[in-house]
Image (tube, grey):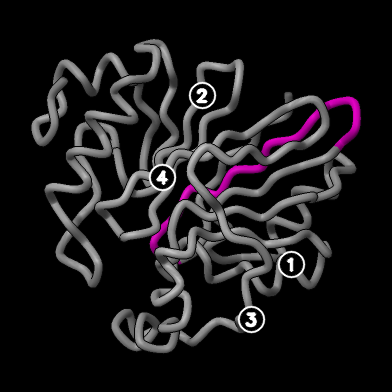
Amino acid sequence: MIRKTFPVGMLQCNCTILADEDTRQAVIIDPGDEAAKIVATLAEDDLTAVAIVHTHAHIDHIGGTFELAQATGAPTYLHDGDGFLHQSLETQAAMLRVPVPTHGPIDQPLTDDQTIIFGSHQLGVMHTPGHTPGSVCFELVGEDLCFSGDTLFNGSIGRTDLPGGDFDLITRSIRDRLYSLNGAVEVIPGHGPSTRIDRERRSNPFVQG
């Protein structure tokens, strides 16, 4: 398994490339910006993108998607619950005072318990609403690895004061879905350092297990 996680864009969203070592097929999680950097990273290991997936549709997680899809030909995926956010990128850009990214339609919806296949690996989808209605987390099947987007952070949780946010929903998503994972699971959040499920169950001040 090849895994590269690196921050992109003004808000330093954690973008991850996961790839199968044999087939060189890759999945890209949350290409929020700097599409050219992501394309160059793929080229370093001779990887072919087969899917571009998103934990949610805030601009810092989806801003580089269209350009990346154009460059790689890979289909894009987003939960339908965040369609309204994807359609309001102009508004989001105005709020942050950043240029509106080039954007286009999403190719495929993400659904709960769906799997995205790349080589011999599978990325499982968990619908975890709260930060946004369509927020999802991704679990690498058979591995102790989860990508939590802006649902769960190291010692914190995602904000719920933006359009579509719901504090009760996000805490329920964390308790019922994420905290049900093996405690050894490493969590790669949408921003900042990684953590582990057992650590967050014990010490997260917002949602303890």
Q: Is residue 108 above or below residue 53?
A: below
Q: Quadrant of residue 91?
A: bottom left
Q: Are marks 3 and 1 in contact (CB under 8 Å)?
A: yes
Q: Identify the residue at image location x=49%, y=86%.
A: 100
Q: Amino acid at mark 3?
A: Gly
Q: CA distance from mark 4 to mark 2?
A: 16 Å
Q: Which residue is mark 4?
A: 127
What whole-number distance in Å separates the C-alpha atoms at marks 4 and 3? 23 Å
Where residue 105 appears, as percent x and y from the top left, is 63, 78
Residue at which label 3 appears: 104
Magenta-highlighted residues: 10-24
Is residue 20 magenta-colored? yes
Label 1 sits on a secondary structure element that is: helix
Q: Is residue 5 magenta?
A: no
Identify the residue under disc 1. Answer: 69
Closer to us: 178 or 115:
115
